[in-house]
Image (cartoon, helix red, strand yellow):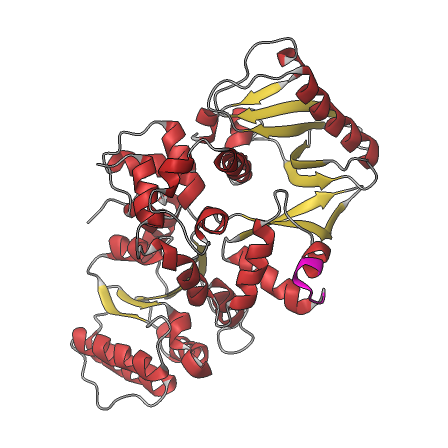
Amino acid sequence: MDNIIGRNAEISRLNALCESPRAEFLALFGRRRVGKTFLINQVFKNQFAFKMTGVIEGTLKDQFTAFSDAMEEFGYDLPEKPKDWMSAFVMLKNALKKTAKREERCIIFIDELPALDAENSNVAGAVGYFWNNWASLQDNVILIICGSATSWMITNVIDNKGGLHDRLTEEMPLHPFTLREVEEYLNEHQFVWNRQMALQAYMVFGGIPYYLSLLDNSESFVQNIDRLFFSRDTKMRREFRRLFNTLYKHPDRYIDIVKALSKSRHGMTREQLTTELKCANNGHLGNKLEDLVHCDLVRKNIVREKEIKSKDAIYQICDFFSLFYLTFVDRAEVETEYWSHHINTPEVNTWMGLAFERICLAHIPQIKRALRIDGISTLNYSWRSKTAKPAVQIDLIIERADKIVNVCEVKYSQDEYELDKEEYEKINRRRNTFIKETGLRHASWLTLITTEGLAKGMYSGMIQNVVKLEDLFG
C-alpha cells in the first residue's frame, strides 16, 4: 500500500485512541475522495473486529446485504437477516461479546454511515443504542463512524439531540491536502514537476488525494488534463454529479448554488445569491450554504465594516475541482485536446488568477508564517466597500493584535511581477478606501502575494511585504 502523505496530527490522535484506558467513539468526516477510508485502513490495518461500508446511493436492502456480508466476512454467525438497524446492531453486539478479547482493542469501523440511512431508516438511533447500552461500557472498544455526507454527519451525529447527543469522544474533520502535501505526494510518486506545475495541479484538483492518484507521471501536466477531463467517456466528466449525489440526498439545489457562485470572481452575499437564484433569503438557503461550507466546497468569508458581520458574509467556491469543472468542462461539446489548444489563452489565464487567489485564502497559516506573524493573534477577512465608486473589494485583510493591518493583493504570474504606476495607484486606492470606510486606526502595510516575487522598479519600494509561491509550500 501507499505511504500516508501528511495527516500527522490525525495519525497522532488515532494512535492515542489505542492507548486510551476507556471506550472511544470517533466520528470522521470530510468530502468525497479526501482519503478518510484510506487513513483508517492504513493506521489500523488488519486490527478490525468488524468493518463494513455503506452502499452509496444503495437501497435499504442493499445496506442490509452489505451488513450481512461484512458479518460473514469477519466470521460471525448471522441468525437471520436483519429487518432493521436496531436488530442488526444487536446481532453485532452479540457476536462481539462472544469473540472480542478483553486484552485487545476491539476496533469497529462503520464507513459511509450516511448511506446506511436509506429510506430514513434511523441508523443513527441504532448506533446510539449500540454505543450507550454496550460499546461505551467496554474499556477496549473503539467505534469509528465515517461519512462523506458531512451535513448528515453533523446533523445526525455531532449535533444529534437523541441517543447520540454528546456521546462522541472524538470528532475529526479531514480536509484536503495543503500545497506542501500535494508536493510530497507528487514526489512520492516520481513526478518530475516543479512548484509551478504542482501549483497548477492544485488549481485543478485541489488537495484531493484520489484525484491526484489519477495523474500519470509519464505524461505532461497538459496531457494529463486532456486525458482526465476531455477524452471520450472519462470518469472525471461524471465526477461532479457523483460528488453532489454522494453528499446530498437532493443535490440539484446545491449544484445551482455552486454554479451561481462560479460566475462571480469575488464571491456573492446571500442577498446577491437570492437575486441570481430567484429564491427567498431564508433559513433554507442559509442551511444549504452551511452544508456546502461543512463539505469544503464553499468558503464563508466574513466581511469587516466597523465590526464583523456574519450576515454580510461573502461566499466563494473553495473546491478547486468544482471551479475548474464549471469553468471549462461543463459544456455541451468539448474537443478532446481542449487543454492543449487553450493553454495560455486569456480565458485560462483569468482562471489561473482566480484559482491562485483561492489557493492563497486556503493557505493563510503559511502566509502568516512567511510574514513572521504566526505567533500574533489575527482576524482574517474579506472587505467590500459600501460607498466607493467604482466599488472596491479586498479579498484578504490580516488585522493583527499588534495594531498593524496587512492589506493583501494577490497576483498570479509566470515570472516576477512588475508593478507599474497604474496598478500601484489601484492598490493604494483600495487601501485608502478600506481605512477611510472602516475607520481602523492600525498602521496599514501593502502586502503582495505572488508566485515568483516582485521585480525591482519605480514602485516596488511601495510594497511593505512580499510573499512568494515557495512560502505557500511552507
**Observer able to see residue 97:** no
Residue at x-position 57% and y-position 31%: 375
At a point 47% along the width and 63% down the height, the residue shown is 150
Specify the quadrant of the image occupied by residue 84. Answer: bottom left
| Quadrant where the C terminus is found in the figure | top left
326 vs 306, left or right, is left
- Residue 354: horizontal and vertical position, in percent? 55, 38
Percent of width and height locating residue 22: 37, 64
Residue 165 drawn in magenta: no
Q: Does residue 125 lie above or below 104 as drawn?
A: below
Q: Position of residue 191 (x, y in %)?
A: 26, 33
Q: Residue at x 42, y 66 (%)?
A: 246
Instruction: Using the rendered view, name the quadrant where residue 460 is placed.
Output: top right
Nearest the viewer among 211 and 87 is 211
Which residue lies most toward the left here? 75
Q: Is residue 384 visible?
A: yes
On the image, the x and y values in percent for residue 92 come to 28, 80
Q: Which one is nearer the viewer's eye here, 134 or 196?
A: 196
Instruction: Indicate left or right for 376 with 384 as reference.
Output: left
State whether residue 69 is above or below residue 18. Answer: below
First to last magenta residue range? 275-280
